[in-house]
Amino acid sequence: MDKNFLNDFPILRSKMNGHTLAYLDNSATTQKPESVVRSICGYYGGCNANPHRGVYELSVKATKVYEEARRKVADFLNATPREIIFTKNATESLNLIAYSYGLTNLRGDDEILITIAEHHSNLVPWQRVAQATGAKLNYIYLSADGNLSAADITAKLTPRTKILAVTQISNVLGLVNDVKTLATQAHEVGAVIVVDGSQSVPHIPVDVRDLDADFLAFSGHKMLSPMGIGVLYGKRKLLEEMPPFLSGGDMIEYVEEQTTTYAELPQKFEAGTQNVGGAAGLSAAIDYLRGVGFDTIERIEHDLTTFAVDELKRLPYVELYGCDAANKIGIVSFNVKDVHPHDVATILDAEGVAIRAGHHCAQPLIKYLGQTATCRASFYFYNTRRDVERLIEAIQKVRGVMHLA
Amino acid sequence: MLENIYTELIAEHSQSRDNRRCLEHATISERGHNPSCGDEITLELEVADGTIKDAAFSGAGCAISQASTDMMIELMRGKTVDEARRLAELFIKMIQGEVTDDAELDELDEAAALKNISTMPARVKCATLAWHTLDTAVEKLGGDVRA
């Protein structure tokens, strides 16, 4: 019997439209346990000062909180602390790579390869790099089960490819890409691999050394942390060769009137006062996740996903996307026949069931699937089978409410 | 609460095909969309002598956005451009909860049935999409058609 996680997440006991909240929008953001909230309060209540700047004890304390968080993230990913850059979220991390690495290293006859299943944050920055450098942006499309087309990978990953940018887990389909193999394939043609870990790092163990990822980005808020703290991992050699992204305070060594030399890693990429309270929260979140254990997290999410897919398949008016592949985790996209996802979400909301409806910041994928929008239920370890049952019960009411039944 | 939103009238209008077509003599075609949720319509107007002779639309979206567009088209057909803009403003004020008096809303005809959307902040944009699009379209037409 698993621990009752609800005790750590009081928000999950709150009432929505007269029903207890069934929060099934974890791919968008997760709830925060009390230990994370306490760590943020603890930082601002007892340790707040500008880190790296003051010689006084309080500033030293703040620096310690910040750098300990960095060490914890490094350890969590099997990286070294100087390879961990704090950002505000995965979007900023991916933009940092696009602007600092992409704009510097790409030329007109180079190619960038991404997948059709990318979130806009791992797509739009590459469009801009392609437009600015003249490089070509290519796409890996999907096979029938929703996984990346192996034929496309072979055909499109060529010596002209300089960057392969791919999500480890699709935020719409929940399918896990074999990033380790993709990294080997990318390196064979001389490309770097950029991994969007936004949906993977919160749910499965991620070891950047084992994956041999060149860059990996994720957001804290999708893994129990506050909003506004994110991470960029980069191999030290690559980060050292890259120019800064943002410039200003704290990222310098010497500033003269006309020139500047930059600070060492990781400060080179952390201009201005950073989100130390957020880093404290992320640190506490990692402690919490380790306490639960990824074995438990994966087991619970697998059970909930399988249960939800099995139950949804019983409903003849529900269409599922990417639900026939085995490498699936935590995310279920579907549509109710003849009902727009926003109407489904409104009807579910009236039952206290919170899901996402729309394009999920992946418009090219939704279009590729032949849809204009989908409903998405996404789970975390604190969800229960009862949440799934309530999802199904609410979906069964949808067509009736819409006068279609 | 839901029964007051997803009424039979709204269901009928959202499924109706009558106004989903292309106009042969469209004076202007205006695209409206909500980027955050994906509702999308293309509104066509045939305007002559300052009057909306005909209107039609195509697009995809939730029942609220589609029903609202359908109702708007039925209301606007035959109205002067000035009248159309005034009614669009009245509708938007109703959805924003600024006008609540039923007598005042009477001239919105069936579209007044969307009044309850004002209690659902997440769906306000769905209800007002067509009306903002109409407003943009007639603004683009400017004084030309009224002459």
Image (cartoon, helix red, strand yellow):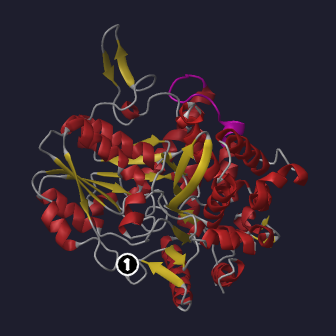
Start-end of magenta stretch:
A43-56
> For residue A351: magenta?
no
A362 lies left or right of A273: left
**Quadrant position of residue A400:** bottom right
Foreground pick, A339 / A29: A339
Name the residue carrying label 1.
A327
- A364 lies left or right of A7: left
Report the residue that reaches farthest toward the left: A159
Q: Nearer the viewer, residue A186 or A71?
A: A186
- In reply to whether residue A54 is colored magenta, the answer given is yes
Secondary structure that dominates the magenta span: loop
Return the x and y of residue A255 as percentages of the image width and height. 36, 14
Please state, as top left, top right, bottom left or bottom right, where the C terminus of chain A lies in the image.
bottom right
- Residue at 43 percent across and 22 percent down: it is A248
Under mark 1, the amino acid is: Asn
- Residue A203 percent location from the top left of the image: 48, 67
Q: State the residue at coordinates (63%, 57%).
A: B73
Give the chain letter at badge 1: A
Horizontal side, residue B61 vs residue A364: left or right: right
Residue A52 seen by the camera: yes
A282 to A311, vertically: above or below: above
Image x and y of residue A87, in percent:
46, 41
Q: Residue furthest top?
A: A257
Q: Position of residue A137 (x, y in %)?
A: 23, 51
In the image, residue A158 sits, relative to residue A249, either above or below, namely: below
